[in-house]
Image (cartoon, helix red, strand yellow):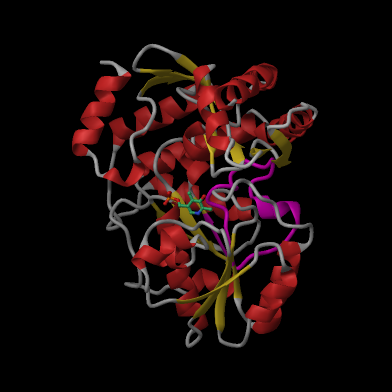
Amino acid sequence: MSTAEHQQRWEATLMRNYGTPPLALVGGRGCTVTDSDGNEYLDLIAGIAVSSLGHGHPALVKAVSDQVATLAHTSNLFINPPALALAERLVVLVGAPGARVFLANDGAAANEAAIKTVLRAQSPRRKFVAAENSFHGRTLGALALTGKPALREPFAPFGIDVTFVPYGDSDALAAAVDAETAAVFLEPTLGEAGVIQPPAGYLSAARDVCSTAGAALVLDEVQGGIGRTGKWFAHQHEGVVPDVVTVAKGLGGGLPVGACIGVGRFADALVKGDHGSTFGGNPVSCAAALAVIETIETEDLLTHVERLGAAWLQDLSSLGSPLVKGVRGRGLWLALVTADGAAPQVEAAARNRGFLVNATGPTAVRLAPPLVLSETEAKSFTAALPEILDDVARLSA
Ligand SMILES: *Cc1c(COP(=O)(O)O)cnc(C)c1O
């Protein structure tokens, strides 16, 4: 069935919240995906920083197939060994002995667990501070903390008191946090806003502000965690120790799984009956996450991501074009900064030439490929970019 037929069926039945996607994807292998018309694309967005091992990685296929054939679901009424093993691994990766894990299904649910953890641990404090332009998810608690008015305001109020501060400004953060602040929620780099890194020292300053005021520092690593920047967690580049960390996207390599990790007294904040999820920690998703973590280790992907990301950033930055003003990011989490309004055109032109990238807004094209992207694959995009930008210039002339 053709792309056009898929789109007609989509428009007839799916809610209109996503608009109509430009392609239907029907297959994938490595870093390549295939659409319903038989065209192939180099996947440089990985389902929004999710398919960390690419498509059809043998370790992921085996882990998921074995587990689904062994036991697909237990619910939280019973222990399942993959969930146990995953929680143990996450505690080690966070590097905070005594940390505890709540397993969820996605990023928003991990952040909801973080909100409840903080409210329990910090009672009677009820106030939150978060960043302008941040993204924490679409459920009502996570949305209340999301610093994009267009997403948030149609659904307000939420019954959660949130003060928004400019991202990256530690003085503004210090001024907003007081003795009633339960927690500061921050992304270590703004992902949905277009891979915007804060100035060096910002997370450490946030740590100090929180410690001084007795507020919790919650780091939302849903997009940046699990190897995307060349470390297990993006905040590990700065050596800060958060009170709560959330992860999701890349953790399951495509299977839905998220986690909220509480450190120190935040490990023990939730008590029996406080929270739950029927599917959270399901054995298939946890087996997938364990395969992702093990493969990152056995293939030494953290080193690969750091090196390839740095080289790619440099190559992309050396392209002279009036349409691309610069490149930012770290590891395999980059953004081309475009002339205003050009990013969606670059996304479309790249797609026409066989590359899937993502315009996060009018001025940023996000690259978040599988962590297993090869140097040759990265270079193929760099080599095609001048033609892609020519296409854009021609079409808008
Ligand atoms: C994607 C994202 C979320 C929400 O994750 P979902 O799995 O879509 O619920 C939360 N925080 C950040 C930083 C994200 O990038």
The picture places residue 387, in percent across and down from the top left corner, at: 64, 17
* Residue 274, picture quadrant: bottom left
* Residue 110, picture quadrant: bottom left
Assess whether residue 136 is covered by the magenta stretch: no
The picture places residue 210, in percent across and down from the top left corner, at: 66, 76
Q: Residue at x 43, y 58 (%)?
A: 151
The picture places residue 348, in percent across and down from the top left corner, at: 50, 27
Q: Residue at x 35, y 13 (%)?
A: 37
Q: From this viewpoint, which residue is outermost toward the front?
A: 397
Assess whether residue 220 is covered by the magenta stretch: yes
Q: Considering only vertical position in the picture, is 34 above or below 143?
A: above
Please indicate, yes or no, whether residue 131 appears anywhere in the rendered image: yes
Q: Is residue 391 left or right of residue 57?
A: right
Q: Residue at x 50, y 39 (%)?
A: 48
Q: Considering only vertical position in the picture, is 331 above or below 150?
A: above
Span colored in magenta? 218-246
Q: Which SS type dominates the magenta stretch?
A: loop
Q: Residue at x 32, y 58 (%)?
A: 277
Q: Considering only vertical position in the picture, is 275 above or below 309?
A: below
